[in-house]
Image (tube, helix red, strand yellow):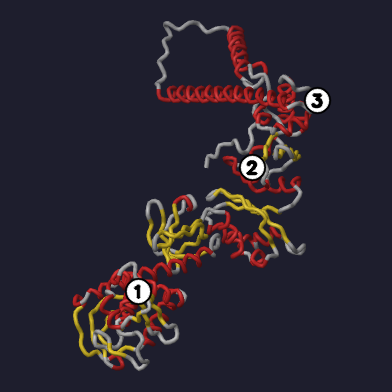
Amino acid sequence: MLIGLPGQGFVAVICRRRQIVPVGWARFGGRGTILSLGPAEACSEMRWPSALGHVVGRFVSLFHSVSTVPRSGTEGLDGSTMNPDELLRIVDVIHRDKSIDKEVIFQSIEAALVSVARKRFGEDENITISIDRRDGTITGYRGDELLDPAQLAARIGAQAAKQVIIQKIREAERDALFDEYSDQINQLVSGTVQKVEARAVIVALPGVEAILPRSEQIPGESYQPGGRVRAVVAEVSKQGIRLRVVLSRTRISFVARLFEQEIPEVAEGVIEIKSIAREPGYRAKVGVSSADSRVDCVGACVGVRGNRIRNIVEELAGERIDIVRWDDDLLVLIPNALQPAKVEEVILCQMMGRAIVLVPEDQLSLAIGKWGHNVRLASKLVGWDIEIMTRPELDEQLEQALMGFASLEGVSEELADRLVSEGFLSYEDLSVIEPEDLMEMSGLTIEQVNHIIEQAEAKAEEAAQVAAEERRRQRQREREAAAAAAEGETSPTPPLDFADSSPPESPDAAVTQNEEEGGEREDIATSESNPGSPESGAGGPTSATTVKDMPDQT
């Protein structure tokens, strides 16, 4: 489609994607009649690549002809007859096309014209230029002197004015988009993949190109140009005249928005999402509660035959989602969060912010989960450190803690029992206690309390070194066993030499030899095991393995 304005103006073709392709210059008559046509290279104005450049270029030509003149029109420098109403129409075009407030456009044009005029008249000159918002006339003053329209047209360069006006309008467009997308932070948006790069995916959103960094992508996902992608707005910032929008598919707000979109009860507020814990690409736990007793919060989220939750799982690239029934009582909530494992008992240690969960031996691995996902996500969901153990393990730790704490100088048996009852099960736990809390529990002075904490810190460091050495030895034994197994598989079996072979030993001798070797191995295992026990030199309880200390192997 050809476009142009009356007079000598810009001719272009509007493509499907609203891009303007320069064609040439023409003189238009009434009703769009082309009087003459020239090549595109005839003027530098033809190099504007967008509709904004065309509109602003047209405005600058208006600037040379529109000022304090009668409403009937005037003849511009290019010989065309203009009307101030056309300036208002061009401002309206920019307003509708770029979603920029008209007042911002007027102020940007005025500021641009003043800036260019000062470069011509002098930076120290008091120059004011105003545009009438009602009739579109331009009035300029140099101090108290009214500037003549011809003087303005002669003094202010068209190309410089266009550059400044373009910059001002682009800044106004950026500010409008910044306000729009700032209000959408943590909200769900949908866009089209424009380009896939090594470190990010470029996504086209309305009015802006956003980036989806690799760190914000779900592990294992792949994207193709032209495909649709949904994400939440994570960050919006200004970079010069451009806007930087960062998307995310790994944040918990993305899961929350998907629940609101797929489950009407969540969007309506009947079901409330209390907490979300997530490890993107692997597993997520969502705690929900219902404001209506007649609505089952878990069943409504799962849907008939799991159709609702299935749509969310597919959007999350197969990420497993556990729906947890929320309860304000931690003794009920923690077993719910650890499902499908069965819990025997939950012991809350208020001072430590820790929950000790006792499970049967056959439920231990299920409660911890693959790579520790289950217990780690449950801990994040409820906001407490969760330690999974069996009852024999707990009894052993309690006994070691009592003996170890009682061996510290200044700690009585009564204080050791009090510490254990509050959930302090290792020297490491005792080393991080607040001195004020220990003073309140024991009635000791600040010097005595600090001395106890210093002893605990030294013992904790010693126990950590012993544990690290034991882990090193264990890895060494595993490597040696693997090397021996590999050598046994690759080496050929040597032939039997019956001539030099000794007669077989009697069964009694073989049994005696095995017993002796077994006794030696038992002694070695006894001396190397339990490095944190008093017999191994640590002289106290070993450091308990908590959720936060577990390595994340994901």
Residue at position x 57%, y 40% in the image: 371
Q: Quadrant of residue 338?
A: top right
Q: Which mark is residue 113?
A: 1
Q: Which residue is mark 3?
A: 414
Give the crowd class for mark 3: few <14, some 14-19, many >=20 residues within 10 Å. Answer: few
Q: Which mark is residue 538?
A: none
Instruction: Work out how far the residue at label 1 is from the one at label 2, CA to CA, in angstroms.
Output: 65 Å
Q: Which mark is residue 375?
A: 2
Between the residue at mark 3 and the residue at mark 1, the CA separation in whole angstroms equals 84 Å
Q: Which residue: 68% across, 47% down?
A: 382
Relative image position of residue 221 (x, y in whole percent):
46, 53
First along the sequence among labels 3 and 1: 1
Q: Please indicate, yes or no, whether residue 344 appears anywhere in the rendered image.
A: no
Is the C-beta separation of discs 3 and 1 under 8 Å? no
Comparing labels 1 and 2, the label whose residue is closer to the camera: 1
Picture layout, residue 473 above or below residue 308: above
Q: Residue 155 location, x and y as percent?
A: 27, 76
